Image (spheres, helix red, strand yellow):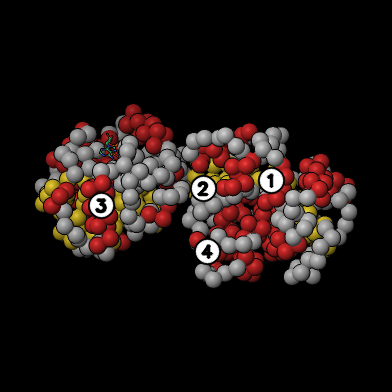
Amino acid sequence: MPRPILTADRMRAAEQAAIEGGTSVETLMDRAGTALAEAVHRLAGTGDTLILCGPGNNGGDGYVAGRKLVERGHRVRVAALAPPASAACVAAASRWDGETVTFEQASPSPILVDCLFGTGLTHGLEATVSERLSDLAKSASSAIACDLPSGVGSDDGRCLSPVPAFDMTVTFGALKPAHRLMPALPSMGRVVLADIGIDASSTWFEIGRPEVPALAAAAHKYSRGYVAVLAGEMSGAASLAASAAARSGAGYVRVIGDGLFQGLPASVVVGGKLGLLADDGRIGSVLIGPGVGRGAGAKALLQAALDCGKPLVLDADALNELGANPTGMSDAILTPHAGEFARLFPGLDGTKPEMTLQAARNSGAIVVSKGPDTLVASPDGRLGFAPPAPSWLASAGTGDVLAGIISALRARGMDAFDAACAGVWIHGRAAELAGPLMIADDLISELPAVLA
Ligand SMILES: NC(=O)C1=CN([C@@H]2O[C@H](COP(=O)(O)OP(=O)(O)OC[C@H]3O[C@@H](n4cnc5c(N)ncnc54)[C@H](O)[C@@H]3O)[C@@H](O)[C@H]2O)[C@@H](O)CC1
Ligand SMILES: [K+]
């Protein structure tokens, strides 16, 4: 099951529904604090532990975790930033009878647990507080954040004040958008999701390992997926995309264009007239963008693709050629990076999740908003958040490879949204396997291992 993702408002509503269903907020907090303590103990073992507690329910989780960690043999000190204020935090703090110091008195400890603020954060921490938090996190061997690193905006991933890097973030019920959004993402460490008995079902989720449909016994090359790649000025980009499609399980890949397609596997067919697109009913998807350029030729290719009635994947220059605010693009997948997104969908505002969903609704397409925090949005409201991908994926040609992978999965009959999510996951995993010095070509070599 993919891990659900909820905004702070939706999380509060889910919490409220649980409370109305008979589970008290104290019980939820007890479960959250217990899960936090367990995760801390598992990560860091037994050791001196400093828990920073804020005045709200994030702090309340900290007081519960303190009690549970003492039971597990930790020496625990709580540093309270302010007196407990929310009713549940007051109740949790009243059951904490261990060592308590003021925030100013907090001194470094091998294990640091940040329970200052979570989803209730409304503004950045005071400078003295964020500086102290950073110092304590840096000097700890294991730094763990409760729900969110304090200072991170839950819904947009903004750092409202400087946020140090944590080794682990333990969250409850559902992930929050910030766990998978820049610029907060690198501060999270491993994100552990604890079940606290809340129904957190959501159409927003973290993209997990995909289930790529198995090949039917009677499969033939066309039923395995026939991808047509339209190529233009820069044949290298089209070669990368076509090779990636071939290595992603497509049964037949054809490149239509006049370039010299070096490095293509011999199994990829080169040539054919544009008219094929509309006439050949076996074509399962058409990819246009990698290397098509910006000339009159590109315009004609794009028009042929838009007119052919086949599932489309539009990337790179095809997106620039498409122009701003496209509509009626159902059955298409658009894969813009941030610059292309801004040109395609000018004037949108809100968080990256909101803008990506709006772009999908307006265009009718599946929109893959690429970056270190890639999102996949469907016009029906589904939103997939990519798991963290290695930073070395940011290099020339990796987008062409992604477009090729998605085209192959689409041609194999996957639903457009599922194909896009699966492509994003496979691409990230291939980068992990390929390692820090990889070039885009290496991703293709890793695809069989990822898809095996
Ligand atoms: N939603 C749920 O289902 C559950 C939430 N729990 C915990 O509750 C947390 C949310 O608790 P709260 O809503 O009490 O909010 P927080 O504990 O995040 O913040 C408490 C209050 O601090 C104030 N505040 C915000 N930013 C501040 C700043 N920069 N400086 C000073 N004060 C600031 C606000 O008035 C805010 O309500 C979650 O992050 C999670 O850790 C858990 O107890 C279990 C269940
Ligand atoms: K926190």
Work out whether residue 44 or residue 368 is closer to the camera in this orientation and state it. 368
Instruction: Tell me the distance, in whole angstroms, between the alpha carbons under discs 2 and 3.
Output: 30 Å
Residue 284 in picture, x, y percent from top left: 77, 50
Q: Which amino acid is tagged 1? A: Asn
Residue 392: which numbered mark, if any? 4
Instruction: Identify the element where label 3 is drawn.
Output: helix
Determine if residue 262 is in view.
yes
Residue with the mark numbered 3 = 131
Other-residue count near label 2 (Cα within 10 Å), few / some / many at <14 / 14–19 / ≥20: many
Position of residue 404 measured from the top left corner of the image (x, y, whole percent): 69, 57
**Which label's residue is closer to the chain start, 3 or 1?**
3
Work out which quarter of the rendered image holds the C terminus and state it: bottom right
**What's the residue type where badge 4 is placed?**
Trp
Which residue was labeled with disc 2?
A: 385
Tell me the SS state at disc 1: helix
Name the residue at 81% across, 66% down.
Answer: 260
Disc 3 to disc 4, C-alpha distance: 30 Å
| Gap in angstroms between the C-alphas marked 1 and 4 | 25 Å
Q: Amino acid at mark 3?
A: Glu
Amino acid identity at mark 2: Phe
In the rendered structure, which disc, 2 or 4, sits on the residue that comes first in sequence? 2
- Within-10-Å neighbours for mark 1: few <14, some 14–19, many 20+: some
Q: Is residue 227 left or right of residue 171?
A: right
Q: Residue furthest front?
A: 295
Residue linked to disc 1: 320
Between label 1 and label 4, give the one nearer the viewer. 1
- First in sequence: mark 1 vs mark 4: 1
Instruction: Give me the C-alpha separation between circle 2 and circle 4.
Output: 19 Å
Q: Is residue 211 left or right of residue 407?
A: left
Residue drawn 52% across the image and 35% down it: 349
Mark closest to the chain's N terminus, 2 or 1: 1
